[in-house]
Image: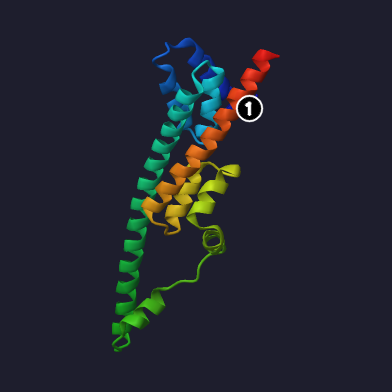
Amino acid sequence: MNPIEDLIAGFQALVAQVPELVQPFIVLLAAAIPFIEGEGASPIGVVGGISPIVAGIAAAIGNFLAVLVVVLVSSRARSAVTTRRSARASVSTVSQGAENGAVMTIAEIEQRAAKPESKARMRVRRWMVRFGVPGASILAPLAIPTHFTAAMLVASGAARGWVLLWQAVSIVLWTALTTTVAWIALNTVLVA
């Protein structure tokens, strides 16, 4: 088994061993881990014997809390980097203009400060333009964890509140879907 399968099996065993009152907290903790998230944690709870509704709610809350932390940290980091870059660029361009004895306009300072975008940054920007925050938030769990998606969206300049709203929608949708599928699969196996 790979490490993710080991982790999931460990959470399932843990859910089955702890008292009923603590079981949703185990699901909540599992949902905070990238690659397990709400989509993986809710089936862990359902298979572990928790009510599908309780498992789904606990998984969605755990996943959202982790994404909230990622968004807040990413937002602060982006603010610090952009503030520092703009301050450094304006100081260096003003000093370069002063060395030449020329007085520079604001437009000239901004033009000198602007650097060409990297290929990765251009790709993210195209992706954002094509799908927007809603589409990126809802479709991204098919490829990468919501934690990474949220950090990428905030780093690209999307508004923190907008990212949180659409990440919450995405988490609820995907968690509800996987909880329902796990519950149906479990009932089908138990009935057969």
Name which residue type carries label 1: Asn
User: How is the protein colored in the picture?
Assistant: rainbow
Q: Position of residue 104 (x, y in %)?
A: 31, 85
Q: Which element is circle 1 on?
A: loop
Q: Position of residue 106 (x, y in %)?
A: 31, 81
Q: Residue furthest front?
A: 191
Whether residue 7 can be seen here:
no
Nearer-the-camera pick, 172 or 150: 172
Nearer-the-camera pick, 162 or 98: 162
Q: Quadrant of residue 105?
A: bottom left
Quarter placement of the C terminus: top right
Q: Quadrant of residue 80?
A: bottom left
Quarter placement of the N terminus: top right
Please state if 53 lies on the left or on the right of 144 as rendered. left
Whether residue 161 can be seen here:
yes
Q: Residue furthest bottom?
A: 102
Please state if 27 lies on the left or on the right of 186 as rendered. left
Q: Position of residue 152 (x, y in %)?
A: 48, 52
Q: Position of residue 52 (x, y in %)?
A: 51, 23
14 relative to 74, above or below: above
Please name the residue shown 39% across and 36% down the image.
65
Please name the residue shown 34% across and 77% down the image.
93
Q: Which residue is mark 1?
A: 2
Please name the residue shown 45% across and 35% down the image.
63
19 relative to 136, above or below: above
